[in-house]
Image: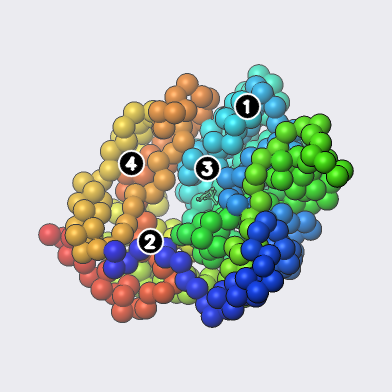
Amino acid sequence: MKFFLSAPHMSENELKYIQEVFKSNYIAPLGEFVNRFEQSIKDYTKSDYALALNSATAALHLALRVAGVKENDLVLASSFTFIASVAPIYYLKAKPIFIDCDETFNLDITLLKQAIYESEKKPKALILTHLYGNASKMDEILEICKENNIILIEDAAEALGSFYKGKALGTFGEFGVYSFNGNKIITTSGGGMLVGKDKQKIEKARFYSTQAREDCLHYEHLDYGYNYRLSNVLGAIGVAQMEVLEQRVLKKREIYKWYKEFLGDSFSFLDELENSRSNRWLSTALIDFKLNELFKEKKSICITQKDLPLHPKISKLIQDLKKEQIETRPLWKAMHAQAVFKGEKAYVNGNSELFFYKGICLPSSTTMSKDDVKEISYLILKSIRG
Ligand SMILES: Cc1ncc(COP(=O)(O)O)c(C=O)c1O
């Protein structure tokens, strides 16, 4: 591929820190760099406690477990997201209730209220995804969770470097998670972080992440856990990547602006929520779309559970760009429309189907220049006009 959606972007210090790890021979399992990585996330996000793990999926699993989610408990969740946000609900044999999105791509407040109101028993937790790095309506969501005693878990896997009213996404709820997989804004090649407000709960998650070993000389287990911790080598990459996070955010935001400049006449670009800063992890665009047409159009497109259609121009565009070695992708296909979750309760309004139909994720690697974005935009316009 000539242009990936979001390629890893190393700075200069990753190799230097990895060499330090090798010199110390602490390549595994834990070590100084894992601690430093946790500290750097705490410093940047102002979160109280942090636990470095081998994926954000693991972080979500542990968050649900230490939140006390058990078999048959109800867990509310953003539907317009990647499956990793919600698969851990199934790991614990709990039941998801999917909530569609509003015009921001994120959780629809009216549907959230309706779901809680109509629920036969009190949902225990809410997994809230900040999609593509864009902030959700935090004031309203926090209030609803507080009123209904629902534990908020923020899936900020895509949103490290995003803020709402000056506060880092991922730090509003009782728990937040970040991902460092290969395509995220910073990467350790694979990795995740659980942050939280309650020391005991994060320490419990730490305990579960290393096979629930009791504190004694031999291996004693009163409970079972997982092998979820991050290695010191990857911690070293993380520390170096955190040093350039802010630069990466600024570049991603520039890329978004450039696409808007070149493609703004043919595509719609969603604005940031007021008082927020998105890290613009992936630049996304919607074809033939005006926000005020949303409600008119979605009536004809709303299809749930079945195969969802893509706009013919979008499927052609993805194929045309592939031939030019340019990676693009449709937006996430909502969880309530996935066969694996057939039969689960969902509160839908047609928005995620409409966004799926009209949307595209554009190459957003921070290694790209303005000329690269110009070249890609030229090919996009050629494809949709041809
Ligand atoms: C919204 C969202 N949640 C969770 C994840 C899972 O992250 P990881 O790959 O680190 O497990 C990802 C990305 O992969 C994601 O985009």
Crowd rating for badge 4 (residues with CA inside 10 Å; few <14, some 14–19, many 20+): some
Please say if 48 is above or below 88: below
Give the residue pinned by disc 2.
5
**Of pointers 3 and 4, the one earlier in the residue sequence:** 3
Give the residue pinned by disc 1.
94
Disc 3 to disc 4, how far (Cα)? Answer: 30 Å
The foreground one among 250 and 65 is 65
Q: Position of residue 309 (x, y in %)?
A: 28, 38
Quadrant housing the C terminus: bottom left
Q: Residue furthest left?
A: 386
Give the residue pinned by disc 4.
297
Please say if 260 is above or below 91: below
Amino acid type indicated by mark 1: Ala
Residue 91 found in image quarter = top right
**Of pointers 4 and 1, the one earlier in the residue sequence:** 1
Please say if 256 is above or below 79: below
SS at badge 2 = loop
Q: Is mark 4 within 8 Å of ligand 1?
A: no
Amino acid type indicated by mark 4: Glu
Amino acid type indicated by mark 3: Ala
Disc 4 to disc 1, how far (Cα)? Answer: 35 Å
Q: Position of residue 299 (x, y in %)?
A: 35, 34
SS at badge 4 = helix
- Residue pictured at 42% horizontal, 63% vertical: 6
Residue 296 found in image quarter = top left
**Of pointers 2 and 3, the one earlier in the residue sequence:** 2
Crowd rating for badge 3 (residues with CA inside 10 Å; few <14, some 14–19, many 20+): some
Give the residue pinned by disc 3.
84
Mark 4 or mark 2: which is in front?
Answer: 2
**Of pointers 3 and 1, the one earlier in the residue sequence:** 3
Q: Is mark 3 within 8 Å of ligand 1?
A: yes
The foreground one among 155 and 92 is 92
